[in-house]
């Protein structure tokens, strides 16, 4: 396993919440969040940094979304669609305007250091509060599913609604032009930042971050339109972001903090060959306290690029680990 530091706070009060993508020519892209004295605050913004394949130095993080007075931008996600376009999904919130929604931009040529990004565009989901953190999933039907956390109430004094946050998906069948919201899965508070994978039988499996000491789960048998009642999984988690994704081998990749109450240690697991819900491995990414928010992407040659943050309000490290599925399996022996 190879490790490198993508960025540190470098005089900024804090930074973290990274996302990672890889262009076809090997160029890597990382989104992160910073701005202001802490999070959440109105000065928060999403930044982008990049480096070419084979280079050792990442570019200086630059603001990825035009600043708007009174508007907070946060929690960027990077994703390449099946046609190779690079997408940046992010959230915008304004207490003054009562707006809390999901936005996007995309670029056709992620192979170059300064691609031309589209103008920011809101995703209209028809609810007063919506946000997301994780990458979309492309189903075998061709539909795109974007995991969404939403609520029926607009926050008025804080950045979060007082009512229950529900989990669902935004579905697009026209390659991201329009999206429709489906699902209202209930889970223990603090419930947010769900992720979805498609099983070999076509069923969808949603995992949900909660404050209950384990991830919760739900299933869909109709492409994400309806979802089963939420229930606890056996995956221990302290109420922090996790990552799950299908690998080219067919196994699932899971990056998780296996502690019920503390953000201590990040480990990598893979599912059994014919059982998506049993994980083996335990490759240690980072044993330290205050490590969190993994994201990853797999290259065509099977190499996995994973990012996470460490000590957001201190050194503010955003770290990249490069490893293979075989290294994860070796950790189980």
Image (cartoon, grey):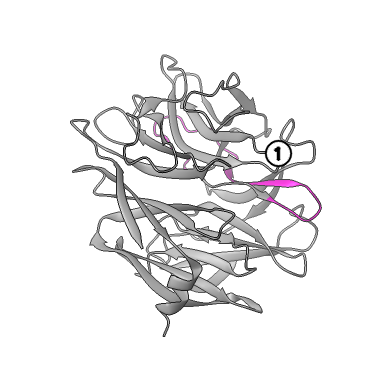
Residue 230 visible in image: no
Write down the region rendered in magenta: 138-162
* Count of all numbered marks drawn on residues in the image: 1
Residue pictured at 75% horizontal, 36% vertical: 175
Residue pictured at 77% horizontal, 64% vertical: 202
Compared with residue 215, is residue 39 higher up or lower down, i.e. above or below?
Answer: above
Look at the image and tell me in which quarter the N terminus lies: bottom left
Q: Is residue 151 magenta?
A: yes
Residue pictured at 57% horizontal, 55% vertical: 195
Q: Check disc 1: other Cα within 10 Å, few if <14, some if 14-19, many if 20+.
A: few
Q: From the top left corner, tell me how far across and down residue 158 is, in percent.
A: 39, 34
**Image quarter of residue 13:** top left
User: Mostly what secondary structure, the magenta segment?
Assistant: loop
- Which residue is tagged 1? 83
**Image quarter of residue 328:** bottom left
Residue nearest the observer in this picture, 150 or 200 = 200
- Describe residue 295's horizontal placement relative to residue 12 as left or right: right
Residue nearest the observer in this picture, 82 or 35 = 82
Q: From the top left corner, tell me how far across and down residue 212 is, in percent.
A: 43, 65
Q: Residue furthest top?
A: 69
Look at the image and tell me in which quarter the C terminus lies: bottom left
Residue pictured at 54% horizontal, 33% vertical: 111
Residue 270 visible in image: yes
Tag 1, which secondary structure?
Answer: loop
Q: Is residue 153 magenta?
A: yes
- Describe residue 75's horizontal placement relative to residue 16 as left or right: right
């Amino acid at each position: 396993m190879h490790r490198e530091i993508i960025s540190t706070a470098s005089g900024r009060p804090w930074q973290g919440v990274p996302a990672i993508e890889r262009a076809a020519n090997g160029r890597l892209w990382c989104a992160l969040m910073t701005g202001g004295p802490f999070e959440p605050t109105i000065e928060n913004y999403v930044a982008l940094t990049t480096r070419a394949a084979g280079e050792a130095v990442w570019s200086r993080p630059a603001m990825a979304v035009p600043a708007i007075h009174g508007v907070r931008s946060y929690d960027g996600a990077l994703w390449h669609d099946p046609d190779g376009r690079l997408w940046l999904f992010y959230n915008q919130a304004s207490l003054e305007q009562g707006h809390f929604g999901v936005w996007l931009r995309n670029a056709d040529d992620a192979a170059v250091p300064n691609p031309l990004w589209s103008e920011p565009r809101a995703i209209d989901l028809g609810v007063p509060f919506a946000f997301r953190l994780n990458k979309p999933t492309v189903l075998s039907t061709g539909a795109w599913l974007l995991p969404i956390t939403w609520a029926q109430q607009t926050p008025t004094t804080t950045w979060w609604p007082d009512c229950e946050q529900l989990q669902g998906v935004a579905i697009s069948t026209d390659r991201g032009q329009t999206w429709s919201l489906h699902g209202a899965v209930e889970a223990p508070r603090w419930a947010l930042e769900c992720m979805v994978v498609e099983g070999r039988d076509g069923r969808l499996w949603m995992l949900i971050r909660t404050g209950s000491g384990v991830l919760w789960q739900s299933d869909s048998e109709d492409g994400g339109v309806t979802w089963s009642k939420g229930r606890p999984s056996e995956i221990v988690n302290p109420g922090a972001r996790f990552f799950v994704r299908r690998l080219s081998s067919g196994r699932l990749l899971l990056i998780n903090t296996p502690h019920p109450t503390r953000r201590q240690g990040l480990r990598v697991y893979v599912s059994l060959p014919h059982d998506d819900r049993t994980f083996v491995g335990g490759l240690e990414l980072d044993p330290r306290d205050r490590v969190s928010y993994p994201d990853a992407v797999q290259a065509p040659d099977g190499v996995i690029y994973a990012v996470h943050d460490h000590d957001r309000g201190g050194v503010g490290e955003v770290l990249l680990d490069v490893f293979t599925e075989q290294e994860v399996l070796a950790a189980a022996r």
